[in-house]
Amino acid sequence: MSTIETPTLTLPEFKNEPYTDFSQPGNRLSMEQALAKVHDEFGREYELLIAGERVKTGDLLKSVNPSCPREIVALHHKANAELARRAVESAYEYFPEWADVPARTRVEMLIRAAGIIRSRKHEFDAWLVYEAGKTWPEAEADVAEAIDFCEYYGRQMLRFARPDPLVQLPGEKDDLVYLPLGVGVVIPPWNFPLAIMAGMTVAALVTGNTVVIKPSSDTPAIAAKFAEVLLEAGFPPRSFSLMVGSGAEVGDLIVTHSKTRFISFTGSRDVGLRINELAAKPQKGQVWIKRVIAEMGGKDAIVVDREADLNSAVEGVALSAFGYQGQKCSACSRAIVDEAVYDEFVEKLKQRVSSMKVGPSDKPDYYMGPVINDRARKSILEYIEVGKREGRLLTGGAPGEGEGYFIQPTVIADVSPKARIFQEEIFGPVLAVTKARDFDEALEFANDSEYGLTGAVYSQNPAKVDQARRRFHVGNLYINRKCTGAMVGAHPFGGFNMSGTDSKAGGPDYLLQFLQAKSIAEKV
Ligand code: NAD
């Protein structure tokens, strides 16, 4: 056996967290009560949490309800450069102590964190509804995924604490041990403000790293609630800092700090590339190459073959394109359809999408809620105007009704693969539909992108499915199903090319990125 540390913790087999069925009156009531409770908490002030110390700066960031932007969800004290430096440096000081805590103990904390979130599931759902504009089922999926990350990474950590035996040379004891890296900076996006933020954070913590979390300015209250969970679960106050602040003001500083060992980022291509570039330059006193885990944008395509079950393809495209208002990195923003079924597909899709209702996300009657903020709304509406020139508007094409950041689900047909709306990530409820001569050309169009995150193929022909398995160049390929909704453990998630470093969150290799392996040979 090649271990230094033998964890004895035994956990039941991993199972994905089931989703609440909101059609049950009891569950509906519980969700309504949670929404009311969270609404009562609106406008509360949240301090920074720097290595266990609660700090006020008086410089406040406001997060609002995108369904009703005059409602202030929370006020957050913003970090300045000095506090950002302090967060990294105290994480650096505490790192050796935290790294020495047995993996088993860290895993126990993580499983406790999962249990706490589970017991407050609807409350977390409600925060996601109000701060991120998620509908009830979308919020529930986000919270369930956060629980899954905790449960799954806990189990994976036990595996790395007890690695497979090495070849034992005669006269030697040969070991491989996995060590944490040091201080990690965690920079999540707003679109899975609980699941992705929690996943990146707990992966770093459970492997024995200390962490500085810089949440998105759109969703800091959710991060503050999660920080409370970490403390309640027993994570030492000095093992992490929660640092709300602007990307430009404190983001660069924590990325470039000489004591930062790695950066775990999920967000847009441009910010990811900038972080990668900044991190590559060694700073005075820095004695390592910083590791960058960067999961970035997507321009995900669904290919609909002439031999597809057309009704299920229409449904898969509609749900993948407009779930959470198209604001998923995995969202379908290009439907590429064989010319033999193009007209029929387009007609069915138009009908299906026209039936999708848009409105405040706290009301369960709507399939779609608002987009995240006014900037996103403007940018998406600009893209819609570009799209109207680049193709034929099929449905939508305008803001939705009401004071929230609503946009109608928009489909633009007859789009050329060279069009901007075919090539650029819009990150909103806008779908481009493109006609292809045959399956080969459809795959060619699908691969004609700098991104390579998710993709799906609808076809009943096994040879074409096989071709897609080999040729469709994406990190997450789905066959005869939608291209969103990756499940922890079943669909390790991460993209190719400009979609990122293919870290495969929720997969068996993910934690390796937060570890370094040390080989030890002892003469015996
Ligand atoms: P974003 O790049 O604008 O922001 C991401 C995070 O980076 C935020 O916390 C932001 O505050 C921070 N940031 C911004 N500038 C910074 C700087 N100079 N230094 C340090 N941090 C900085 O992205 P977003 O709008 O929050 O999220 C949407 C994007 O995320 C989309 O492109 C989407 O495709 C992508 N995304 C990718 C995945 C994936 O797994 N590949 C998952 C979710 C979202």
Image (cartoon, grey):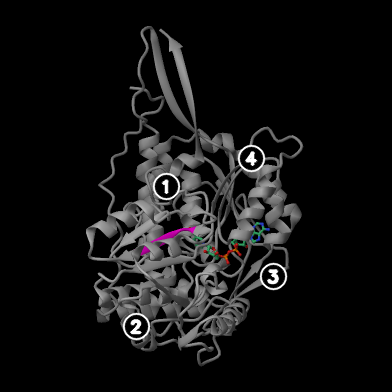
User: Spatial distance from mark 4 to mark 1, Cα to Cα?
Assistant: 21 Å
Q: Report the side of 292 relative to 202 (left or right).
A: right
Magenta stretch in the rendered image: 452-456
| Left or right: 470, with 186 as reference point | left
Task: Specify whether residue 114 is in view.
Answer: no
Instruction: Identify the mark at residue 343; answer none if there is no mark.
Output: 2
Mark 3 vs mark 2: in front: 2
Q: Amino acid at mark 4?
A: Tyr
> Disc 1 to disc 3, how far (Cα)?
32 Å
Residue type at the position of mark 1: Met
Mark with earlier residue (4, 3): 3
Q: Amino acid at mark 3?
A: Leu
Element at badge 2?
Answer: helix
Residue named by callout 1: 109
- Asked if disc 4 and disc 1 are in contact, CB closer than 8 Å, the reply is no
Nearest the eye: 413 or 263: 413
**Crowd tier of the residue under label 3, counting other residues whose Cα lies within 10 Å: few below 14, some 14–19, many 20 or above:** some
Q: Secondary structure at mark 1?
A: helix
On the image, numbered disc 3 is attached to which residue?
Answer: 60
User: Nearer the N terminus, badge 2 or badge 4?
Assistant: 4
| Main secondary structure of the magenta stretch | strand
**Residue in the foreground of this view, choosing between 332 and 348:** 348
Is residue 421 something one can see in this rendering?
Answer: yes
Tell which circle, 3 or 2, labels the residue nearer the N-terminal end: 3
Is residue 292 in the magenta section?
Answer: no
As helix, strand or loop, the secondary structure at mark 4 comes to helix
Mark with earlier residue (1, 3): 3
Q: Residues within 10 Å of mark 1 (few under 14, many from 20)?
A: many
Quickly name the residue at label 4. 92
Amino acid type shown at disc 2: Asp
- Could you tell me how far apart the alpha carbons at marks 4 and 3 are, in whole angstroms? 27 Å
Contact flag, marks 1 and 2 (Cβ < 8 Å): no
